[in-house]
Image (tube, coloured by chain):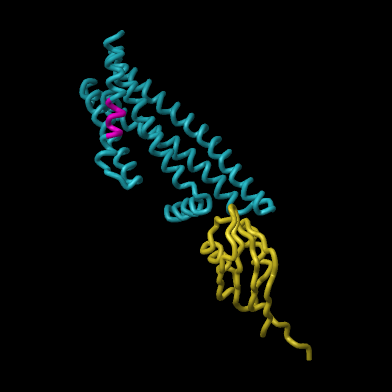
Amino acid sequence: MFSRLRKSISGIFRYSRAEEYSRRYAVMNAFDGVITVLGIIFGSVLLGQAAVKQILAAGIGASIAMGISGASGTYMTEKAEQERKIKEIEEAMLVKLDGTVIVKARERAAIISAIVDSLSAMLAGLVVLTPYFAAAIELLTSEIAFHLSTIISFALLFGLGIFLGKIAKKDIIRSGIKSLVVGLVTLLLIIALNLIL
Amino acid sequence: MSKRPLALSRLVLDILKPHIPDLIDFCRELSSIKGVKKVSGVVMEVDVETDTVKITVEGKDIDFEEIEERVKTMGAAIHSVDEVVFEE
């Protein structure tokens, strides 16, 4: 079953050439997921001294919202893009392409992009929150959860940077550090806000 | 005694197709049709969105309707049938 699914997805990518879009969405939204939840954790702890359950609720809520917004937004955008491309081919071919492998693959590519987009944002957010899940059932203290979440966030950002560096075939360490800087900027802004308020 | 009908064994088609599926996928799809033993394709012209290709299909008792159907499924159109061979 797994190999059939793989074959079918590779067929969709082959006929729609949408692989790079899905990859782009995956990285972009995992980034969103990590930074958003990191922002919630830092904001809650530094600015509001929130309890574990409040952070967990806010984090899960944000992850679900990102997942839904990612899926619907990407599906609509990708569908419009794919329809435009189909229309261009139809105009060049002077035939309707309804029912062809091209239309089927492009329709499915929009769905795959939406799923990838939604899952990457949601999973990345939830992974950052894992220490707080442990803290909620009293396996960790809230302080350790905070530190662990920060470490996981930065590790994920670094990992995403490395992945981007690999795609671009550039210096992967430099690329990893670049995305770490994004996390640090978020952190510094929240700390600055804490000092002002 | 009536003569046994001959079967379609070779076809040369002039086809207009989108860039995707590419020529390899296109020929592979046609090669999976029953009776087809050999498929070869040559790109004649490349346009912004389309390719004009010459496809030669060889085999034993080739089902032309099935070939037409598969070509259509891949978003392409047969412009002309340039060569046909029927044999025993």
Magenta stretch: residue A182 in it?
yes
Q: Residue B8 sits in which quadrant?
A: bottom right
Relative image position of residue B87 (x, y in whole percent): 67, 83
Relative image position of residue A44 (x, y in whole percent): 31, 16
Of the 4 image quadrants, the one containing the N terminus of chain A is bottom left
Q: Look at the magenta stretch and give its main secondary structure.
A: helix
The answer to whether one can see residue A73 in this image is yes
For this orientation, the residue located farthest to the bottom is B1
Nearest the eye: A43 or A55: A43
Chain that is coloured cyan in the picture:
A
The answer to whether one can see residue A98 in this image is no
Q: From this view, report whether residue A63 is shown above or below residue A19.
A: above
Residue range highlighted in magenta: A178-184
Q: Is residue A162 left or right of residue A61?
A: left
Magenta stretch: residue B69 in it?
no
Q: Is residue B27 left or right of residue A23?
A: right
Q: Is residue B26 left or right of residue A124?
A: right
Chain B, colour shown: yellow
Q: From this view, report whether residue A19 is shown above or below residue A147.
A: below
